[in-house]
Amino acid sequence: PQFCHPGDTDVIHPCREYQMPRIHYFVLTDSKAGKLYGTCLTVYEEFTPSSDVPQQEGGKKLYAPRVLCLLSTWPYLSSFRTYLTQLYRLATTTDLMEAPIERYILNICEEIPAPPPGAFEVRVKIMQQQIRFWAPPAQQPIPYVSVSFKSLFECLDIGNIMFTWYTLACERKVLLVSDQLSLLTVCAEILCSLLFPMKWSHLYIPVLPRSLSPMLDAPMPYLCGISRANFPYAVQDIGDETVVVDLDRNVITVGPETPDLPPIPHKRRVKLEHALEAHAGDVFWNARGLTHEQAQAIRRKGSSAATEEMHANADALWYEKISTVDDAFSLAHAPDAANMMFTDDANSGADDALAGKQSRWDAVQEAFLRFYVAMLKEYRKFLPVEANGGTSQASWRGGNSDLRFQTEDFVLSQRPDFQPFLEELTSTQQFDDFITKRIYNAGNEPDVTFFDQSIDAKKNRSVLKFKKADTNFLHAASAHKKLSNYDAVLPNRNDVPSSACSKIGVNGRPVYQYPIWPEEFDTSLFGMPRPIPKNITAEFERRIALKAKLKARTKEIRAKRSMGDDATVSSMASYYGLDS
């Protein structure tokens, strides 16, 4: 309950003024780093106190918040947002509902499958709106969130995004702050995805309830988020080592005791910054009614008055825009606008040569991936023998130094300007997890395989090309356009007791109406889930069979091959149809 009502205490107080429905998300993490995503729609419905409670003066109505929460291990945040809001509208404000609410719940939970990575797209229709569910291709296992990356780049400029990412890469304490609860989870998920091939493995609570604010004094790295309304209650708990990132105001405050960050290699920093500016540098200023060129032109004039006026006008427009982000029925979050990670906006602002080939946000993710590829391109030379195809028994923490990753040798073998960051990175928990996975499960982890193949692609480009040419690793957006589409089955209208309907509609079918969302569901109306359509189950079965063949064949090859034969496995995946 505290995550559904993050701003309240143990007692929920009704209010006298009606408030518009709002949306927020939260994330729960288990002991194995698995995530459970919650999408919450908070609505305010008329509240009638019990007879022993004194009535309000003047007979004013009271309104109490009620939260509709959808839980899933899949991060379809915006799609679930749209589904919840449309279902609530359908049930409480229309006479178009031809099945009881219970059948809609059964439908989304039991009858609509989550598509495997890169397999197909499932489309769900509700209130004449189409909601889409899909996952990126398996051979490009970049962490993703089904929300627009644009959200983060509207909140923070390029410099502050790079600083926040680098702070997380070095495992410091980071606290996000915003008036809009939904922004906290969205931006936290995007920041985590930029750490690939690493994964954030410390305390992670994108929306921190007021009652849990003492956790901000934890003696460990964390990535947390807190609403501005709760921030004053948490100030005493925020440690002096915390970096506070204000998403609404594009301001970062570094705690006085925050450990210094190692210098980022100059050449890599410049390349990363230029790539981000090229693909997303205009997003921050566009959200404030300016182009990047207009902002730079005003600054070049050197007039402090003109610069202050520009920022005042830009901030006023931005605050007006951002104030509605949590509004459940905001047009900005219509199903065809922001429920997908990549939209028609994806290619705008990119080089014409990239249009239609790689989306803007693929390019942004790839810029961070290239940083890690450049920094870690030689790491495999320092793995234990077994991890590179040998036969020795490797151990990450073993006493024999020949059976562990040679951290010190790896750092010292790199360029001097790389060494400060690599020394910091190799001491982090995320690098420990990455190397452990690489040693023990390299053949079964698509993210490890993909990262190694990205390193090979970079090396081949450098060796085989007389002139450097761009080699794009990520094509999730274009791959999405090639996916087959399957329409999900609608809620089952059959075998519903006639007494359950509210009336008979003009088309002769039963209609179900709810003045308010029901406090309890009628378990007798759920019914039995129907089988998933055969065309979808056939696709699942085909991919399972192909993966089994590939796994068996790969096991044979790995027993014989040397380190340089990775391309064999990659080509096999393509042959068996598992690269898309």
Image (cartoon, rainbow, N blue to C red):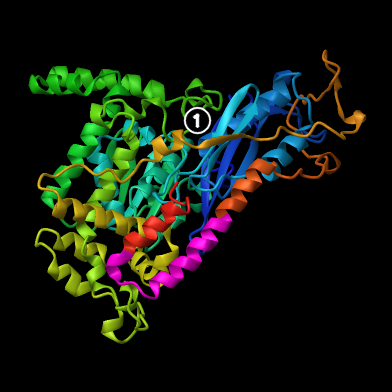
Q: Position of residue 296 (x, y in %)?
A: 15, 23
Q: On the rendered structure, is 22 left or right of 175?
A: right
Query: Among all residues in the image, which is located at the extreme top?
Result: 506
Query: Among all residues in the image, which is located at the extreme front?
Result: 575
Q: Position of residue 148 (x, y in %)?
A: 41, 34
**Tag count:** 1
Residue 291 figure quarter: top left
Looking at the rendered structure, the kind of residue marked 1 is Asp
Q: Which residues are magenta?
A: 544-565
Residue 494 figure quarter: top right
Q: Position of residue 450 (x, y in %)?
A: 35, 55
* Residue at (45, 42) in percent of width and height: 145
Q: Is residue 316 above or below residue 251?
A: above
* Residue at (81, 45) in percent of width and height: 528
**Viewer-closest of 435 and 27:** 435
Residue 244 figure quarter: top left
Q: Is residue 199 magenta?
A: no
SS state under label 1: loop
* Residue at (34, 50) in percent of width and height: 174
Tell me if I can see residue 253 in this picture: no
- Predominant SS along the magenta part: helix
> According to the image, label 1 marks what residue?
326
**Viewer-closest of 531 and 344:** 531
